[in-house]
């Protein structure tokens, strides 16, 4: 199983938040999302600074990044089910 590292990204600075051996990138990206949520709670001032959590592999190659302040739901495009043309729960 691969080893993934997690960094807090503040501008061009990377602050190591630790690492985990996980089954795959899907689990690592889920853990990055959890870490971003936790950091928002304990360090809310980072949300307004455009900070993120990134996931890297053992070669320090960035594989995934998630912002601490994700796009608000009202700014996201509506979800459309595969094979459908109207948004889920609404009209086009």
Image: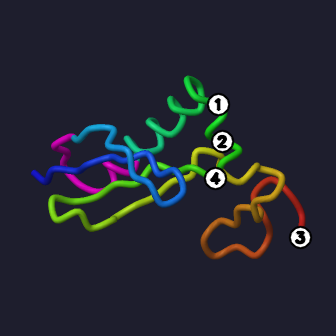
Q: Circle 1 sits in a helix, a strand or a loop, which is it?
A: helix
Residue range in magenta is 20-29
Q: Earlier in the sequence, mark 1 or mark 3?
A: 1
Can you tell which mark lies on residue 92?
3
Expressed as whole percent of the image width and height from the top left, the position of residue 76 reads: 75, 60
Label 1 to label 3: alpha-carbon separation = 36 Å
Judge whether residue 25 is colored magenta: yes
In this view, the residue farthest toward the left is 1
Label 4 to label 1: alpha-carbon separation = 11 Å
Q: Residue at x 33, y 46 (%)?
A: 6
Can you tell which mark lies on residue 50?
4
Q: Circle 3 sits in a helix, a strand or a loop, which is it?
A: loop
Expressed as whole percent of the image width and height from the top left, the position of residue 56 reads: 28, 58
Q: Residue at x 63, y 76 (%)?
A: 83
Label 4 to label 2: alpha-carbon separation = 6 Å
Residue 2, above or below 87? above
Expressed as whole percent of the image width and height from the top left, the position of residue 43 reads: 58, 28
Expressed as whole percent of the image width and height from the top left, the position of residue 47 reads: 65, 41
Give the labeled residue for mark 2. Answer: 47
Q: Circle 4 sits in a helix, a strand or a loop, which is it?
A: loop
Q: Circle 2 sits in a helix, a strand or a loop, which is it?
A: helix
């Amino acid at each position: 199983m691969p080893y993934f590292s997690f960094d807090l990204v503040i501008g061009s600075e990377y602050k190591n938040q630790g690492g985990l051996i996980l089954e795959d990138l899907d689990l690592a990206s889920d853990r990055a999302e959890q870490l971003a949520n936790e950091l928002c709670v304990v360090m809310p001032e980072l949300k307004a600074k455009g900070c993120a959590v990134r996931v890297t592999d053992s070669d320090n190659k960035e594989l995934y990044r998630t912002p601490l302040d994700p796009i608000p739901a009202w700014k996201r495009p509506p979800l459309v089910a595969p094979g459908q043309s109207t948004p889920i729960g609404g009209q086009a």
